[in-house]
Image: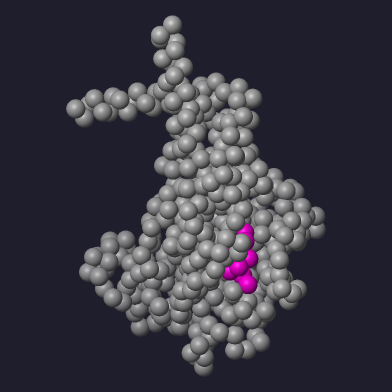
Amino acid sequence: QPGIVGRISKNIELAKKGYEQLVHAIIRPPRARYSLEQLGPDEFTFLSKRFRRNDFEITTEPKKLKLQASIWTQQQEDDETSTTNTTKTTKTMVVYLHGNASARVEVLPQLSFLLTQNIFGVCSCDFTGSGKSDGDYVSLGYYERYDLECLLQHLQEMHGPDLEIVLWGRSMGASTALMHVSDMTQSSIERENSENDTTDSIKGLICDSPFCSLTVLCEELVERAREQGIVVPGIIVSAAIAIIARSVNKLAQFSIYDIVPLDHTPTISVPALFVVGADDDFIPPHHSEALVETYQQGISTNLLMVPGGHNDARPDVVFEAMEQFFKYRFSVTEPPLTVPKEMKASYYRNPPWAYYRYPAIFKALTAKQTAATTTKNNENMPTAVTQEEELGMTKARQEDIQNTVNTMFGGGEKEEKRDEDDNNSDK
């Protein structure tokens, strides 16, 4: 019958459209765009300490792509070039790993907090396929873990083998950190000699909203489609994931079946602090719970479940827990910098240059003042990234992915009708 044939043809077209969009969502999410000015000034003073930002580029293995990174280091009064390894003193550093659809600027709202920890430096990069780095695709941890290895090797070369590093990753970055430090990954890395082993430098992991398995995450998206009334037989789900896997492998040269941090945690010997939003319905809390449960026995882990969703700013209790984590994982002899009471309500949320100086303290700028300063193009106050909702897996992007899954399995008819209604109303 013509009506049935037409409906079948329409469903096939919707499924094809959804399939293509889902492959694109996995390996080519929206690329974070930003200007170098948004990384802040090259040099600045914060809480009476001098800091310098250095941008650098490295070539990754195995793909030979250019990766862009930045490091913010505390400058010693008697050392104008402290970004090179001039002493044998242990140096402590946080390496921040951004999430999907994001870039190194993701660290900026947390930079003031990190610099108050009195550590040597903070480093953040654009993974290949993200931000200003080379690469057409992301791989949700598969190649990013090797990007991280190349970055850590470069940091050791620049600052010496006595580095102590805590990796702080969010979402994709958190899963990357977990896979990188495992024996499974480390055994696959070819090094010229054992002295180049970067795992000895890694003293802790902070993992915010990691996923335990990419295919499990895909299956959960389908389950949510079922909850919305879309009938999806189990055999169709397995077949669809297999087809997507082949396309991803063809385009980006990795298997989605290999993105399973849960397989890596039993061999991880680095203490970890896990953070997850209790209201996260994109990567639900049970992913973090499973990762903690399978962590190598005898290795310290803690799970902090806090209010909020996947991409929400974290409450103060998270930063308080991190401060304690740094205290036990780093060999820092001096206490954190004293934060004036005028800053305590905001320094978890703003980069250091979001404050201007009074005789002895910095006073927080209001959002209105920040906007006015930016409008005036004040050279002493470069534009800062403060709108976290523009980076990462925002609620809108999560909904786009869910709608794509719904479309792929025949649930796009309502969405398509709404689009038609919108078009008719425009006319």
In this picture, residue 207 sits left or right of residue 424: right
Residue 146 covered by magenta stretch:
yes
Residue 207 makes an appearance in the image = no
The N terminus, quarter of image: top left
Residue 357 vs residue 297, the one in the foreground: 297
Residue 150: percent from left, percent from top: 60, 68
Residue 81 locus on image (x, y percent): 50, 88
Residue drawn at x 48%, y 90% as measured from the top left: 80
Residue at horizontal 62 percent and vertical 39 percent from the top: 215
Magenta region's main secondary structure? helix
Q: Is residue 118 above or below residue 32?
A: below
Q: Residue furthest bottom?
A: 78
Q: How far from the left and from the top, in percent, is residue 89?
A: 65, 85
Q: Is residue 383 left or right of residue 99?
A: left
Quadrant in the picture for residue 352: bottom left
Q: Position of residue 76 (x, y in %)?
A: 52, 87
| Residue lying farthest to the top in this orientation | 1
Image quadrant where one finds the C terminus: top left
Query: Quick one: 51 or 213, which is closer to the camera?
Result: 213
Residue 187 visible, this angle: yes
The answer to whether residue 300 is left or right of residue 341 is right
Instruction: Please tell me which residue is depicted at 34% across the width and 75% down the height of the picture.
Output: 356
- Viewer-nearest residue: 128 or 220: 128
Residue 170 within the magenta-colored segment of the rendering: no
Query: Which residue range is magenta in the image?
Result: 145-153
Query: How many marks overall?
Result: 0
| Residue farthest toward the right in the current orientation of the protein | 298
Q: Tell me which colouring the rendered structure shows.
A: one colour
